Amino acid sequence: MSQCTALVVEDDRALREALCDTLELAGYQVAAAADGIAALDMLAKRRREIGVVVSDVQMQPMDGHALLKKIKAQYPDLPVLLMTAHGTIQKAVEAMHDGAADYLVKPFEAEVLVNMVERFAIHDDGDDGTAIARDPVSVELFALAGRVATSEATVLITGESGAGKEVLARYIHRQSTRSEGGFIAINCAAIPDNMLEATLFGYDKGAFTGAYAACPGKFEQAQGGTLLLDEISEMSLGLQAKLLRVLQEREVERLGSRKMIALDVRVLATSNRNLKGEVAAGRFREDLFYRLSVFPLHMPPLRDRPGDIIALAERSIEKVCRHAGQPVPVLSGLAKAALLGHPWPGNVRELDNVMQRALIVRNGQSIEAQNLHFESTARATTMPQVESLVEVTLADKLDEDLKTHEQRLILEALRAVNGNRQVAARKLGISPRTLRYKLSRMRDSGVTVPKRYGREFA
């Protein structure tokens, strides 16, 4: 989980706050601006801490494209993600030509936003990118990945959403002879098909309306390095055929061009689907499947590699605290037992979220079992051996206990400061937006917030 600051630029207040809430809950520090001019002013003051910009396109007086050009002129290394409700290829390619790292087409799921920000954000947290492999299953997997990394074989990585497929892909890149080259990733599920073709293969000037200048695609951008085709199973059959040709011929032709460009790119692909099943169902080309799966790897879900859970949790805690300049708390024995007993349907992504919440609600220099809140109501069918049956019983009550504890803390903090949202948020160690989000969730679950300050947070 990255802890850089994300700058959100959106003129719609409700949407701006929703975007900020989403990123804060994912563990990011967030700054917000209502227009491009305010965003540039904020960048001038806080450039060192801002690691990514997420901006709307349709804004006044400065639209997202104009803001993008100014950012690229002043801060060329700062990644900018553009959001647009106008999902046309013209808008997308203009953004890529102007230097956008990527784009999101509204409406999009919160997970798509978080994943894209995590992918492009400039990390300044001292993380060396070392993969966590403590469980014997993971140790064997990464050893195998290290061996295939030294080859040029195309690798297909399968696994559940959030299990760490991209982590494994980046590990392969770092261990390869291409590690000095770029690692370019593209989420095939997040981009409409007509945009995906231009994004992958690039285009020449005049290729279509809005193509005012030539723009290289992701394949060209990855020259000398590695290209990750994330969630390849979501690509249409028509585009699959074009991709197959590129992989076979090792050359690409931009849209609107007749010139073939030789490629020196290693291709990795991921999927959260059973691609053999997709082939059987006629949704994925069999020839492309065999071209991609020269060396298949499977990233097991977190529940199947319990030896990694505590190490991953501790790394998540350490990264957050190091960024905030705070002492790193330890996990108590009961907290570890609870973590090991949870089935983790959301995998590593869910684990990061749980640890982020625990750091907010904890007291003292340890994280206790009651600080852990699991979104899923599903529980593991078995619990790892712990020192006593009492620990198992306590772990089973964590969800209910934590909700009650958190709600009590929030209400007490508000009463202590006469309902002042800003002061209460500081006392709780969270942002006002997060406090508003939590109060909304409390009301939805039937908790009564006293009216004398409840209206302020509605």
Image: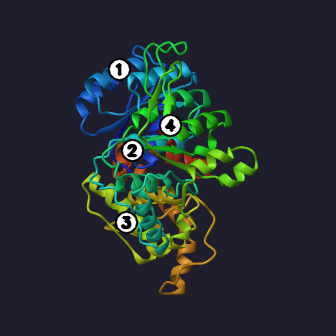
Relative horizontal placement of residue 182, taking residue 14 as reference (left or right): left
Which residue is depicted at the point 53% across and 40% down? Answer: 247
Q: Which mark is first along the chain, 4 or 3?
A: 4
Determine whether 82 is above or below 62 in the image.
below
How many residues crowd mark 4 within 10 Å: few (<14), some (14–19), many (20+)?
some
- Residue 106, picture quadrant: top right
Q: Nearer the viewer, residue 427 or 155?
A: 155
Going by the numbered disc 2, the residue's amino acid type is Ser
Q: Nearer the viewer, mark 2 or mark 1?
A: 1
- The image shows residue 198 at horizontal and vertical percentages of 53, 26
Which residue is denoted by mark 3 in the rendering? 314
In the image, taking residue 9 as reference, residue 76 lies left or right, namely left
Q: Which mark is residue 18?
A: 4
Q: Which mark is residue 69?
A: 1
Instruction: Kindly state the secondary structure of the residue where label 2 is placed.
Output: loop
Q: Is residue 365 above or below residue 22?
A: below
Q: Mark 1 and 3 residues: CB-CB less than 8 Å, in contact?
A: no
- Give the alpha-carbon distance from disc 1 to disc 3, as whole Å: 40 Å
Q: Residue, x 37% and y 53% (percent of image)? A: 428
Q: Residues within 10 Å of mark 2 (few under 14, many from 20)?
A: many
Mark 2 or 1, nearer chain start? 1
Judging from the image, what secondary structure is the residue with disc 4 in? helix
Q: Helix, strand, or loop for circle 3? A: helix
Observer-nearest of 109 and 159: 159
Provide residue 49's location: percent of width, then percent of height. Answer: 27, 40
Q: Upstream in the sequence, badge 1 or badge 3?
A: 1
Disc with the residue nearer the chain's start (2 vs 4): 4
Task: Say whether residue 420 is visible.
Answer: no
Q: Nearer the viewer, mark 2 or mark 3?
A: 3
Tell us which disc is closer to us: 2 or 4: 4
Answer whether labels 2 and 4 touch (C-beta < 8 Å): no
